[in-house]
Image (tube, rainbow, N blue to C red):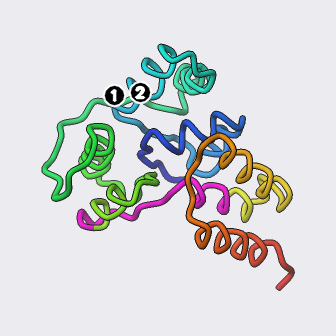
Amino acid sequence: MRSIVSNATPLIYLAKVGKLELLRKVFGDVLIPEEVKVEVVEKGKELGERDAYTIEKAITEGWLKVLATQSIDIPIQLDPGEIAVLSLAKKLELKEVLVDEASARMAARLLDLKPRGTLFVLLKALSMKEIDIDDFHEILNLMIRQGFRLKEEVYLEALGEAKRITSPH
């Protein structure tokens, strides 16, 4: 198991569809900077979002860890949460970050970090047999109905990869 630093989007959408625990199953400890906690828990609760309470429970359980970090210079304009995620990963000398937004993924690559996204979590959970192909389809479609944005070609690519993972070799 390896730790990973996560941005808000994977936390929010996995929590919205009741699958936040997949992060723990795939990565063990999941780290978030304080800026992301504020975004997903405090602001989420202000907006009355149920997923904010799910995420807060994971923090209380101790597998979702909140850490403070100093911001580093990022060569691309990003929001404070994304800057904090990349900064924390560099500070802890981790290789991977969990970010979905294209600009944050590009910045991660520029900093020699490997960007992973929510789809990676679902595909990894599928390959680990934590979910089956039907769960994969259901979770993905539920997330999209909740507002998770995915280009059609990425959606089709993910379905193809899921089929490849589950087909007998």
Local crowd size for mark 2, using a 10 Å CA cut-off: few (<14), some (14–19), many (≥20) = many
Which residue carries the number 1 mark?
34
Please name the residue shown 26% across and 37% down the image: 80
Nearer to me, 95 or 87 = 87
* In the displayed structure image, the side of residue 58 where residue 39 appears, left or right: left
Q: Quadrant of the C terminus?
A: bottom right
Q: Which of the 4 quarters of the picture holds residue 111?
A: bottom left
152 lies left or right of 68: right
Image-based side of 11 in relation to 36, left or right: right
Number of numbered discs: 2
Q: Is residue 145 magenta?
A: no
User: Residue, x 41% and y 61% (percent of image)?
Assistant: 115
What segment carries the magenta color?
110-124
Whole-percent x, y for residue 166 in the image: 81, 72
Type of amino acid at the residue the image marks with label 2:
Lys
Task: Name the disc covering residue 37, or none.
Answer: 2
Looking at the image, which residue is at 54% across and 21% down?
56
Task: Find residue 160 and report its horizontal and vertical position in percent.
Answer: 72, 76
Disc 1 is placed on an element classified as helix
